[in-house]
Image: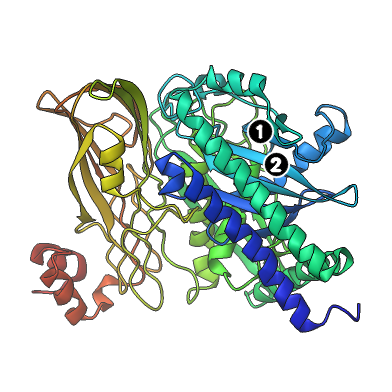
Amino acid sequence: MAKLDTITLSVLQAALQQVCDEMDLTFSRAAFSPVIAEANDRSDGIYSAVDGSLIAQGSQGLPVFVGVMQYSTKTVIEMIADGRCLAPEPGDIYIVNDPYLGGTHLMDVRFVMPVYRNGKIFCWLSNTGHWPDIGGSVPGGFSASATAVEQEGLRLPPVKLFKKGVLDAEIYAIICSNIRVADQRIGDIRAQAAALLIGQDRLNEILDRYGDETVVEAIAELRRRAAEQMRASIAAIPDGVYRSQAFVDSDGVVNEPLTIDLAVEKKGDTLTFDFAGSSKPCAGPMNSVLATTLSSVYLAMRHIFPEVPISAGAFEPLNVKRPEGTFLDAKYPRPVSGCAAEVSQRIAEAVFAAMVQALPEKVTAAPAGSSGNFALGGNDPARGRDYVMYQISGGGYGGNADHDGLSNGCSTIGISKSPPVEIMEQAFPVLYRHYALREGSGGAGKHRGGFGLAYEVEILRGEARASFVMDHGRFGPQGALGGRDGAPNSVTVFRGGEAHVPPHLSKEQDIALKAGDRVRVGTPGGGGYGDPRQRDAKLVAEDVRLGYYTAEQAREMFGVEV
C-alpha cells in the first residue's frame, strides 16, 4: 500500500486511459469503412479478468458501449467457464455480435482478447466497431420492418476469430459468405485486431514499469473512488421520486408510438430507475436488449455527472430494475436493429426529463436523440462493384440553465460525427446537393435548443435501395421547464419527380432508387429550456439576423418583434 501514493495513482489512472485512447486512434486510422475511419463509430476498453467489469474506456469511444462491452466480456468469461466457448490461449481474439449476449444491434461487432501475465489472464481488452453491413434483408442491416432478429443479419456467438494470433480462415469465410461487400471487411477486421494488440503492448509497458501488484491495487482504488464520487454527487439531490416519459415514433411495423415510462427514486446516495409501465415488447426492430438499456442509463448519468471518473465503480450507486415484460428487455427472437442507435437515446431522454426536475441547473432539455441511420446499398456501374453506404447525422442539443444548445452535435450516445461529404462522394456514387444547419429547428426557450442538420443526397448512377431507422419524427425533442420541443425529424424521398414521405415518418426500408432520385433529411433540433418569453430580445434579433429564425417565427415563438 505504501507504493500507491496519490501521484502514482493519478499517473496510473491517466496511463490506463491513454491505453484505451491509443486503441481508439489505431482502430479509426487503420479501418477501411468511413463509418469507423471517419465517423469514429467504435470504442475500446479494458475489463476485469474476474467478471468483465469496466476498468477504463477510451475518451474518444461511444459512451453507449460503456456498459455494453462489460456485459459482453462477462458473457465470454462465463461461457468459457461452463464449456460453451473454447478456452483462451495467448493471441486468441473472440468475435461476438449476438445482442442477447450483452450486445446492441448486430452491426456492432465486438472483439474480446485476453491479456496474459506470467501465464495467467491479467485482464481482457475489448472493442466494438460498427460494420456497415452484417447481411440480413436490407443493405446496412437497418431493416425497419423486421419481425425477427434473423432478418437483420448474421448473429455470432463468441467464437475465436484469431487463434494464437492467426486469423481463422474458416470462420472468416463464413462471415464473408453472409455479408455484402465482403472483400472490404478484412480492412476493418485487421484494424479492430490491431487496436487490441496495440493496447496489449502499451498495457504491458505500464505493468513492466510499475509492477502488476501496484497496477491491480490502483485499479481497485480507482473503482472505489469512482463509486464514492458518484454517491457524493447523488447525495446532493433532494430525496424523492422523479417521473418522466419519452416516446418512440413507432416500431417500424405497427404505426403507433411506444412509451418509455420512468420513475427515478433518489434515496440517500443511490438512484433507482424503474421502467415499469413502459410499452410491451414490439413487433418491429425497436426493442432494446437489457445490456443496452442499462448502458443507456449509465451514459445519461455520465452526461449529468461528467466529472465522475469512468469505471464500473461509477455504476454501483445506480440501481436499474430489470424492465421485464417491456420492449426495454428484449428476448430472442425479437428484432433489435434500432435499440443502440435510437431506443437508447429515448431512454437517456427519459432520464434527462426526470432529472432536470431534481437538478435544473445541471441537466439540459432533450437533445435531438437520433443517429439518423440512413443506409444505401446498390451497384456502381462506373466502378463495376457493389457498395453499402451508411450515413449518420447530428442534431441540436437541448438548451440549459447557462446557454443555448449546441447545433449539429453528435448523438446522445456517442462521439460519432457525420463522415465528411467529400469522403462520401469519393467512396459512393452520390452527390450532396445541400448540407447545412436546419434553420428554425431549435426549440424556443429562455435558452433555445440547438439546430439540426438539413441535407439532400442524389443518386448519380446505377440503382440502389434505401432504408431508414431514425426517430423523433412524430414527437420533437422535449423542452424543459417551460421550453418548447425541438422540430421533429423529417424524411422525404424524391423518385421520378414525386415526393414520398414514409408512412412511419422516420422509418422505412428497401426503397428502390435510381440515378437522379434524391433523399432529403432534416434532423431534429434540441428542446428549449425555460420560458421563451424570457429570452433576451437582443438574442432573438441576432438569431433572426443570422437566419436561424424568420421574423414571423420570432414573433410566434418568442413574442419578439424584429
Amino acid type at mark 1 = Val
* Residue shown at the point (38%, 42%) measured from the top left: 471
> In this view of the protein, can residue 101 be seen by the observer?
yes
Compared with residue 479, is residue 305 higher up or lower down, i.e. above or below?
A: below
Q: Earlier in the sequence, mark 2 or mark 1?
A: 1
* Residue shown at the point (63%, 58%) measured from the top left: 20
Image location of residue 372, percent across then percent down: 36, 43
Asked if disc 2 and disc 1 are in contact, CB closer than 8 Å, the reply is yes
Determine which of the numbered discs, if any, sits on residue 457 in the image. Answer: none
User: Badge 2, how many Cα within 10 Å: few under 14, some, many 20+?
Assistant: many
- In this figure, which colouring scheme has been used for the structure? rainbow
From mark 2 to mark 1, how far is it between C-alphas? 8 Å
Compared with residue 361, is residue 549 higher up or lower down, i.e. above or below?
A: above
Image location of residue 488, percent across then percent down: 30, 48
Determine which of the numbered discs, if any, sits on residue 112 in the image. Answer: 2
- In the image, 473 versus 220, the foreground residue is 220
Q: State the residue position of label 1.
A: 96
* Residue shown at the point (75%, 37%) measured from the top left: 92
> In this view of the protein, can residue 218 be seen by the observer?
no
